[in-house]
Amino acid sequence: MDVSIVIKGAGETASGIAHSLFTASLTRICMLELEHPLCVRRTVSFSEAVYERQMEVEGVVGILVQDQSGLAEAWARKQIGVMVDPAWKIIAELKPDVVIDAILAKRNLGTHKDEAPVVIGVGPGFCARDVVHAAIESNRGPNLGRVIYSGSAEPYTGIPAMRGGCREERVLRAPNAGIVRTAKYIGDSVNAGDAVLHVGSTPVRAPINGWVRGLIREIEVAENEKVGDIEPGASPPCCQVVSDKARAIGRGVLEAIMHYLH
C-alpha cells in the first residue's frame, strides 16, 4: 500500500508500532528522533540507528537518513528511515498520509489533526476527534491497544507494570544529573546491590535479583531520568523481541489506519 507514515519517536513503543506496520506492508515509514535518544530498551528500538547508522528489529531494518532524498532511498530498499528531527520539520515537507505521536511523553507536545489526513496519538494527553483522529490506549490492562475514536486515553498512573511480582523496583533512575557509565550490559544477570551503572560518580544499584532488560547509552542524563530496567526471575528475558505491550499498541495503530484509509 502506497501510504507514507511519520512516527514521532523511535523508542521501544514507537519501534513496535513501526514493526507492526512494516510487516503489514505499510513500509514507507519515517521515524523522528532526538539528537541523543534516551532509550533504555535499545536492543528493540530503531532509535539506535541515530548512534549506529543502522538498526535491525526482528528482521526489519531502520537506517539513519538526513533528508527526503535519503528517505526515498531507504524506502526503495524496503528500509525504515530514521531522522534526527526533534522539531518535526519533515512533516511539512513530506506531507505524509499518517502521523503517529508515539513519544509517550505522558502529555501532548504539540501534535494536532492538521498535520496529516490521519493523526494518531498514543497514550495520555490525546483526545480523539478534538486533538487527534484516534487515540491508542497505552496502559496495561484489558484496554491495552484499544483504538479510541471518541474520547481520551487513560491518564498516566506513574506506576510501572507488574513483572515477576515487582513494580517500582524494576526501574532504575538517575539519582542525579551526570554522564552515564555502565557497569553491566543488556542481558547480564545481577544480584540485589550490584552496581548496574554510574551517573557521574554515583552508583545505581540493582534493588532486586534478575537480569538487565534495558540500559541507557553512556550519555548525559537529567536527575530522575529512567536509565535501566531489571527483569526479575531466574531465566533471562528475550531482549531481542518486541514486547507484548508495544506489539499490542502497534496492532491498535494499524487498526486505526485501516479504519480511516478504507
Image (spheres, rainbow, N blue to C red):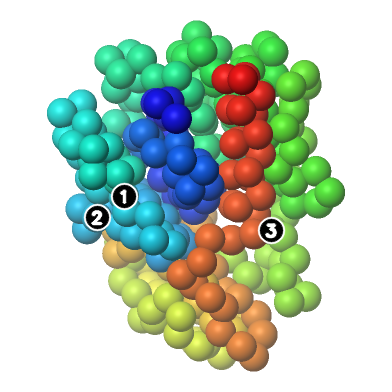
**Residue in the image at 48% along x and 48% along y:** 23
Could you tell whether 174 is left or right of 151 in the image? left
| Marks 2/3: CA–CA distance | 30 Å
Residue at numbered disc 3: 160
Are the residues at dot 2 and dot 3 in contact (C-beta closer than 8 Å)?
A: no
Name the image quarter holding the C terminus. top right
Are the residues at dot 1 and dot 2 in contact (C-beta closer than 8 Å)?
A: yes
Q: Position of residue 216 (x, y in %)?
A: 40, 63
Which secondary structure lies at badge 3?
loop
Query: Which numbered dot is residue 62?
Result: 1
Give the amino acid type for the residue marked by disc 2 in the picture: Gln
**Residue in the image at 66% along x and 49% along y:** 248
Look at the image and tell me whether residue 221 can be seen. no
Give the amino acid type for the residue marked by disc 3 in the picture: Pro
Q: How many marks?
A: 3
For marks 1 and 2, the one nearer the N-term is: 2
| Marks 3/1: CA–CA distance | 28 Å
Are the residues at dot 3 and dot 1 in contact (C-beta closer than 8 Å)?
A: no
